[in-house]
Image (spheres, helix red, strand yellow):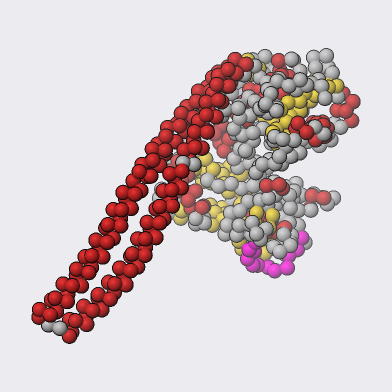
């Protein structure tokens, strides 16, 4: 596939009929205006064509990495696709047919090479120090001496028991000098036993001292080398972030360091998405859609052929700047960020009545994503601290507790962690249930290969319990749920699973079937109705309720 590949016919044929599943988005750090770019079905289809090409070439099977494709239009109106890889490809940063790295790497290439060599040397020295022969010999001899001490202790314990028995016996049968002579003999035996133990410990300390000193010296070197390694990495990172220059669609160019002065991880700017967006901006291309996927050996959180969004630490912080200046901003699905309903507030905490469809906190792929917390921070700039103490699902409405101080956050978080908070939910299910009340106890597990779902798994799952009570019987019964644990999607899985209630919550897009009916529910019918907790400063019981909106 060439760097620029005409795709006009393909794009027209595969233009998606539904809204994208994912948006690359961010607020510009200068204007605070939000910019967004979708991942569409057409972009995913193009990416799958690239996967087929990668699968046919052995060079792309050895190392796992993120790849990306950007659908765009040239200034002449021609539709094209660009492709990029994250980091290096088979040890190369600039490969024919792929978008080149962002300018700046060449300026620090010599420093990077020298630093990487130094880091490799430090790594080898650390391995040698960690595998020092004296460590194994010390452990072996410590065990041998401990075994001797244990054996001697057992022997002395038995002898002491025998001496105690003899003392009791002779105290009854002997008197005067005879008794004193026997007691002195027993005391001398006890003293000899103590001396034997002290001599063995002294022998141990003399034998182990040089080994312990060698290990302590090696540990001190390890600490110093790790500090040197950290300083070298930070120095390289600072040099690279100063040299890297990004350009956006408003024609602005800025050094990476200036966009996030507090620091970004090493490798920021080397991912596929920033490469693609920078290249498009510098060539006056108009982006249409972007898709990134993992290819190569699987990792603990990445599977080959799966699509992923902007990485949280490296890409998301600069996404707002990179997207700035597109032809028009794309409105968020939720529309204007309206004020939130406050159920309770004092100087330490805030209780919000969260609407359905709004995140509790920004998602992992976007620190600026619309949510209760980000909306509060934007609407309350005078507040020094605002942090959600717990979370409820995006589709769930109702009570969400937000701390206004770090101390309150710690105290409330501890209450949630220790299950000292009682939460009550109300839900409408999609079909009738058998029992009017009961306890659901099912082990829940989040399979990393099937995110974002939670499943019942008796081997890997964590315990989860929910008490329920039928409030109104009908074809779509209304229930009260009281969760005793706080697993992800706990109530939704307990309702839907055959070993639970076997009745998904009405409008559940993950675990239900109601959305396939002729009259689909407009939202997830689950509401956090009440909460009871201990106030973090007054220690008084605080009970908050919220009106059920369905």
Depth check, front residue: 169 or 242: 169
Q: Which residues are magenta?
A: 431-442
Vertical comparison of 327 with 377: above or below: above
Q: Is residue 88 magenta?
A: no
Residue at image location 28% in from the left, 53% down from the top: 202
Q: Is residue 330 visible?
A: no
Would residue 78 be found to the left or right of residue 402 on screen? right
Outermost residue to the bottom: 173
Q: Is residue 437 magenta?
A: yes
Q: Position of residue 196 (x, y in %)?
A: 27, 61
Vertical comparison of 292 with 253: above or below: below
Vertical comparison of 437 with 310: above or below: below
Residue at image location 52% in from the left, 45% down from the top: 389
Q: Position of residue 84 (x, y in %)?
A: 73, 26
Depth check, front residue: 244 or 409: 244
Q: Position of residue 357 (x, y in %)?
A: 68, 42
Depth check, front residue: 174 or 376: 174
Outermost residue to the left: 176
Vertical comparison of 410 with 61: above or below: below
Quadrant containing the N terminus in the rendered view: top right
Residue at image location 19% in from the left, 70% down from the top: 187
Occupied quadrant, residue 179 = bottom left
Q: Is residue 433 visible?
A: yes
Residue at image location 72% in from the left, 23% down from the top: 276
Q: Position of residue 50 (x, y in %)?
A: 80, 31
């Amino acid at each position: 596939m060439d760097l620029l590949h005409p795709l006009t016919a393909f794009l027209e044929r595969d233009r998606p009929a539904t809204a994208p599943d994912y948006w690359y988005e961010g607020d510009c750090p200068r204007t605070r205006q939000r910019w967004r770019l979708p991942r569409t079905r057409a972009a995913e289809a193009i990416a799958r064509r690239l996967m087929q090409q990668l699968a046919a070439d052995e060079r792309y099977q050895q190392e796992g990495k993120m790849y990306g494709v950007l659908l765009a239009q040239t200034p002449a109106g021609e539709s094209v696709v660009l492709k990029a890889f994250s980091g290096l490809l088979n040890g190369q940063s600039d490969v024919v047919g792929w978008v080149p790295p962002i300018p700046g790497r060449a300026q620090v290439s010599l420093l990077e090479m020298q630093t990487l060599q130094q880091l490799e040397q430090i790594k080898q020295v650390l391995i040698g120090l960690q595998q020092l022969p004296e460590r194994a010999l010390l452990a072996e001899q410590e065990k041998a001496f401990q075994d001797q001490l244990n054996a001697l202790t057992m022997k002395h314990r038995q002898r002491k028991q025998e001496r105690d028995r003899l003392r009791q016996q002779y105290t009854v049968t002997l008197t005067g000098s005879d008794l004193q002579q026997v007691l002195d003999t027993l005391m001398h035996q006890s003293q000899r036993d103590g001396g034997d133990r002290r001599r063995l410990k002294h022998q141990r300390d003399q034998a182990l001292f040089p080994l312990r000193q060698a290990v302590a010296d090696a540990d001190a070197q390890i600490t110093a080398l790790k500090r040197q390694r950290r300083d070298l990495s930070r120095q390289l990172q600072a040099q690279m972030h100063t040299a890297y220059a990004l350009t956006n669609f408003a024609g602005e160019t800025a050094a990476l360091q200036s966009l996030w002065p507090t620091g970004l991880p090493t490798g920021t700017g080397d991912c596929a998405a920033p490469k693609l967006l920078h290249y498009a901006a510098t060539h006056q291309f108009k982006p249409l859609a972007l898709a990134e996927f993992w290819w190569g050996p699987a990792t603990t959180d990445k599977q080959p052929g799966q699509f992923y969004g902007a990485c949280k630490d490296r890409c998301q912080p600069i996404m707002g700047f990179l997207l700035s200046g597109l032809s028009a901003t794309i409105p968020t699905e939720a529309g204007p960020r309206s004020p939130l309903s406050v159920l309770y507030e004092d100087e330490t905490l805030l209780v919000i009545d969260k609407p359905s469809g709004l995140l509790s906190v920004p998602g992992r792929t976007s620190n600026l994503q619309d949510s209760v917390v980000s909306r509060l921070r934007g609407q309350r700039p005078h507040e020094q601290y605002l942090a959600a103490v717990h979370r409820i699902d995006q589709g769930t409405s109702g009570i969400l507790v937000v701390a206004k101080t770090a101390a309150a956050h710690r105290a409330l978080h501890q209450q949630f962690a220790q299950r000292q908070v009682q939460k009550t939910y109300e839900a409408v299910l999609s079909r009738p249930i058998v029992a009017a009340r009961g306890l659901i106890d099912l082990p829940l597990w989040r399979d990393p290969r099937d995110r974002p779902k939670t499943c019942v798994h008796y081997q890997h799952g964590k315990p989860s319990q929910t008490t329920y009570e039928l409030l109104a019987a009908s074809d779509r019964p209304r229930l009260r749920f009281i969760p005793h644990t706080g697993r992800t999607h706990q109530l939704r899985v307990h309702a839907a699973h055959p070993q639970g209630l076997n009745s998904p919550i009405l409008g559940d897009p993950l675990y239900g079937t109601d959305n396939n009916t002729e009259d689909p529910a407009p939202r997830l019918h689950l509401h956090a109705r009440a909460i009871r907790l201990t106030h973090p400063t007054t220690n008084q019981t605080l009970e908050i309720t919220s009106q059920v909106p369905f």
